[in-house]
Amino acid sequence: STLVAHSDCSSSAVWSTMADKAQLQEAIKTQGEVVRKLKSEKASKEQIDEEVAKLLQFKAQLGGDEGKHVFVLKTAKGTRDYNPKQMAIREKVFNIIISCFKRHGAETIDTPVFELKETLTGKYGEDSKLIYDLKDQGGELLSLRYDLTVPFARYLAMNKITNIKRYHIAKVYRRDNPAMTRGRYREFYQCDFDIAGQYDAMIPDAECLKIVYEILNELDLGDFHIKVNDRRILDGMFAVCGVPDEKFRTICSTVDKLDKMAWEDVKKEMVNEKGLSEDVANRIGEYVSMQGGQDLAEQLLQDPKLSQNKQACAGLTDMKLLFSYLELFQVTDKVVFDLSLARGLDYYTGVIYEAILSQTIPAPAEQNGADEAAVSVGSVAGGGRYDGLVGMFDPKGRKVPCVGVSIGIERIFSIMEQKAETSSEKVRTTETQVLVASAQKNLLEERLKLTSELWNTGIKAEVLYKKNPKLLSQLQHCEETGIPLVAILGEQELKDGVVKLRNVASREEVDVPRADLVDEIKKRTL
Amino acid sequence: STLVAHSDCSSSAVWSTMADKAQLQEAIKTQGEVVRKLKSEKASKEQIDEEVAKLLQFKAQLGGDEGKHVFVLKTAKGTRDYNPKQMAIREKVFNIIISCFKRHGAETIDTPVFELKETLTGKYGEDSKLIYDLKDQGGELLSLRYDLTVPFARYLAMNKITNIKRYHIAKVYRRDNPAMTRGRYREFYQCDFDIAGQYDAMIPDAECLKIVYEILNELDLGDFHIKVNDRRILDGMFAVCGVPDEKFRTICSTVDKLDKMAWEDVKKEMVNEKGLSEDVANRIGEYVSMQGGQDLAEQLLQDPKLSQNKQACAGLTDMKLLFSYLELFQVTDKVVFDLSLARGLDYYTGVIYEAILSQTIPAPAEQNGADEAAVSVGSVAGGGRYDGLVGMFDPKGRKVPCVGVSIGIERIFSIMEQKAETSSEKVRTTETQVLVASAQKNLLEERLKLTSELWNTGIKAEVLYKKNPKLLSQLQHCEETGIPLVAILGEQELKDGVVKLRNVASREEVDVPRADLVDEIKKRTL
C-alpha cells in the first residue's frame, strides 16, 4: 500500500494496534499527503477513494474531536451486502443447484473460512498474491480460503478419506480487481461438487458434466456450451510441437488467454515473452484451432505426431470414452472438445472443462462506464480432474484421485437480478400468508391473540406493531409485501366467533368460523 | 505472540511476505528457541502446540529440504470442519429456526465476512481485543465481523432503512479461548432475528421472546427458561443504591457474572476492585436476588426508592406491559423477570433477555478432562433492545430503534450431535432414493442410461462408478448409506422391458415395467 511505502514497517504495526496517539496523528498527516499527491497526479477515482477511506479510518481510530463521526459508511472494497430481494433470488438459485447435487447423491461438508497460511502455499501458482492474509495477532499464521478445492483436499488428507461425493457452497476470497457490474467480487460464492475415489475411467468425469448441463438448463439462462479438453492432451501437444518441458506450464497459461485474446496476440506472447520460436508457436496454433466431438478425438489418435506421444494418446482415448458416456447422458449437444481450453490452475492433471453462456447481457445502466455497455457473461462453471492435490497434503504422499466442478454463482446472480428487474413480476421477500388486522380501535390484544394462535398452528402470520393502525395502512402493507390474505377482527366478528378473511388481490371478503380459519388459510395459500 | 515479543516488528512483517530466505531461517531459529523455552517452563500443551505449529509454518514457507512435507495437517485453532453427518444435523436445526423466522414474516439479508476495521471500533467495550484483523496488504484496514448486530446497524444506516424485520444466519469470529467440547469456537454461527422501526412499546419485544420460546420448544432440547430484565431498571437500581454514574457500566459487567459466580464473590469484586462501599453493594445485593413475573414489576413500582427514579419507572412500566403481551402469546410459563440479568454488551438500551437450558449434559468422554465431566449448557439465546446503535453510524445521528435476539446455535449443535451419537437411529447424509445396479457384467452403459433417465425425471439416483461391480458391493453401498431401493438391470429384464425393484430393508423384489418405474419409486419413497 502507499501508506506502508511512505513509512517504515514498525510504526505501521503500532498504528494498527492503536497504541500511540502521536503516531496515529503522524499517520494521518502522512496519509493526507498521499491523498493530496494522488489527486494532483489525477489518479483514478477508485484509487483516491481507497486512500481517503484509509485516512478516515485512521481519524476514526484516533477518536476524540478529530475522529468523531468521521465514519466511512461502506462495505469493504469488492464486497457487497445482499438485500432481501437479492437474498430471495440467491435462495432460488441455491435451491436449484442443491437439488441437483442431492439428486446425484452428494453429501455436503463445510470448512472454516480461514486456513493455516501454509495450507494454501504453493497451490495457486502466480495467483497466490491474491490471497488475503490475517494479521499476526499471536498464534498461527492464517489466510482466508481462496477456493473450496484446496480446503477439500486438506479435509480428505486430514481425515484419511479415500471415497466421497460431496458438495460445498461457501464464500471464498481473492484480492483481485473487482468488476462488480460483471459479477466479479473480492468475496464471492463458490458452489463445488467433487467426486473423490479410485474409479473406472471417465464415469465420474461424465457425471460432473451432466451436472453442469442440468444446472444451466434448469437455471434457464439461455443457450450455453461446455468446452472440454485434457491436460495430458495439452502436454502431449506441447511436446510434439517442440515446447521444452520446463515451459509447459507457462505456455499453458498463455493458451488459456485464447478466450479473451486473438491468436495473433497469444502467439506474440509465446514468441516475445515466453521465448518460443515462430515455428513452434505456429504448430501450436494449428492444434488449438481445432474443435469437435468424439470424431475429433478419433482423428487426432491417427495424427502422425500426436499418436506417437503416450500422454496425448491416453488423453485422447479417455476423451473418446468420455464422449461415449456423455452420449448416454444425452448431453453431447452442448459439449465441444476444444484444444484451446487450458484453464489456469496448476493442480489439474486430466480432463478439464468450462461452461460458457452464449448471451451477452447489458450491464446495469446506472453503474457502468460507456465501455461496458454490453458484457459477455462468459464462463459460469469450470472444473476438471486433479489426481495429485490430496497427495500434497498426505504425509506419505498417498494419492486420492478427484474430479469436480465449480459453479460461478455470482455471475448467475447478476443475470437473475437483472432479469428480475426487467420482469413485471414482483419478487416477494417474505412468505407471510396472512396479516391479522382490525378496522376498529382497542383490539390490539385480540389481534395479538389470534396471531399467536396462527403461529402455533404453523401459519405464517404478521400483525402491525401499532395499538390502533388504520385499516388502510394494514392493507397497504399487504400490497407492498405481497401478503395474499387479511384476517380482519371487529367487535361483531368477535361476538359471532368468526373472522373476516379478505383476499387482497380480489378484495373479496368472507366470514370464516374461527375454528375453520387455519384450514381456510391453508386452502387459499397452497 | 511470543514470537513477536522475541523479535522486532519489522522482520516479522518480512517473514510473512516470505521476501527473504535468510530472515525466514532466522525466524525458524528464534521460534525454535521459543518452543524449547516453553517446554522447559512446562507451559500448557495448548500453548506449546500453538508455537510448534507456527514453527512448522515457517519451515513450510521456507520450502526446500527443510520445509518439504512438513505440513501441519489441521484446521486453525478454535475452528472445525463439519463432516456430512454434522451437516445433516446442522441443516435440520437451521430448517427449524428459519421456518420460525419466516413464520413471523422476516426477510433475510447477508453482509460481507469482513468490515472496515473502524466500523467495529468502539462497539464492543473490553471485548474489542478479541476482534480478528486482516493484514494490511494495501488498501483498506479490515476486520472479521464479531457479531451480526453491528453489520446490521451499519447496513440500516448505509441504506437509510428505518423499518425492517430481518434474520441473518452467518459465521462470526472471536479470538477467544476456545472450549470446543462445550461448543465454544473462534468461528461460530449466529442466528439473529431483529425488528427495526419506531413502533408502539413492547410489541416487537414480545415477539422476539415468543420466537425464542417457539424455537427452543421445537428443537426439543428439554426444559428451559428465559430471564428478562431492562437496562433502565438496572440503571435506576444502581442510582438508588448509590452507585456513581460513571461506574454504571462496569458494575453492570460485574452483576452479569452472577450466573457463574456466587453473590459473595460478585460483591467482593464490587467492593475490592470496583471501589463500591459495602453498603452500596449490599443494597444492590437485595435487588438482584429478586425474581418474579408481572407481579414483581408491580411490586417494584411501589418500591419507595425505585419508584422515585424515572428510568426505573419507565422500565418497570414497560415490563408490566411486556408481560401482558407474553400472556397473550402464552409463553409466561418460561419467562422470569430477573433483576440479576445484566448482559455484557454496551449497546443495549432497554429490555434484555437470555434463554437458559435446564439440563446439564455429559461432555463427550474422549475429549474432556475430569473437571468437565458434566457441563451446564447454559445460555442458548440472548438479546435485547438497542435504540442507539444505528445512530452511531448515521452522519446525522438519526436513531432507528431496534430489538433482536441471537440464537446460540453452536451449543445447540453440540447437544444435537451428542443426542444423535447416543441414539440408535442412523443419520442419513444423502437423500438418494434408488441405486441403479446390475448382477451381470457388461451392463455399465445400460446402468448409466437408466440412471440418466431417472435424474431427468427428478429421481435422486446413484450408480457405482465401476464397469462391473459385484451385486453384493452394490447392496452394501445401499445399506451403508441408507438408500432404500435398488433398481436392478439384467439381460432378461432388458428383454422384458422391466426393472427389478428391490427393497433394501425387506429384500422383497418386484418386476416393474420400465414406463412405471418413476411412479413406483416415488410411491415407495414418500
Image (tube, coloured by chain):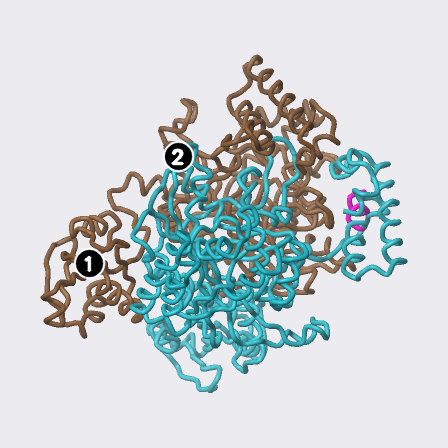
Chain colours: A cyan, B brown
Q: Is mark 2 on a helix, strand or loop?
A: strand
Mark 2, other Cα within 10 Å: few <14 / some 14–19 / many ≥20 = few
Is residue A461 in view? yes
- The one nearer the camera, A277 or A197, is A277
Horizontal relation, residue B265 to residue B397: left or right? left
Label disc, if present, on residue B437 of the rendered structure: 1
Horizontal relation, residue A450 to residue B111: left or right? left
Label disc, if present, on residue B360 of the rendered structure: 2
Label disc, if present, on residue A291 of the rendered structure: none
Say which quarter of the image contains residue B502.
Answer: bottom left
Q: Going 43% across and 66% down the picture, which residue do you hit?
A: A337
Q: Quadrant of the C terminus of chain A?
A: bottom left
Residue A127 drawn at (x, y percent): 61, 50
Q: Magenta includes B14?
A: no
Judged by its main secondary structure, the magenta piece is helix
Q: Going 29% across and 38% down the picture, which residue do you hit?
A: B422
Residue A135 drawn at (x, y percent): 66, 39
Type of amino acid under label 2:
Thr
Q: Give the range drawn in magenta.
A: A56-62
- The one nearer the camera, A405 or A181, is A405
Q: Mark 2 lies on which chain?
A: B
Residue A417 drawn at (x, y percent): 56, 72
Is residue B297 in view? no
Q: Distance between the residues labelled 1 and 2?
A: 47 Å
Horizontal relation, residue A146 to residue A306: left or right? right
Q: Going 56% across and 46% down the picture, which residue do you hit?
A: A246
Q: Going 56% across and 12% down the picture, which residue do you hit?
A: B40
Type of amino acid under label 1:
Ala
Horizontal relation, residue B296 to residue A44: left or right? left
Q: Are marks 1 and 2 in contact (CB under 8 Å)?
A: no
Say above or below: B67 vs A210: above
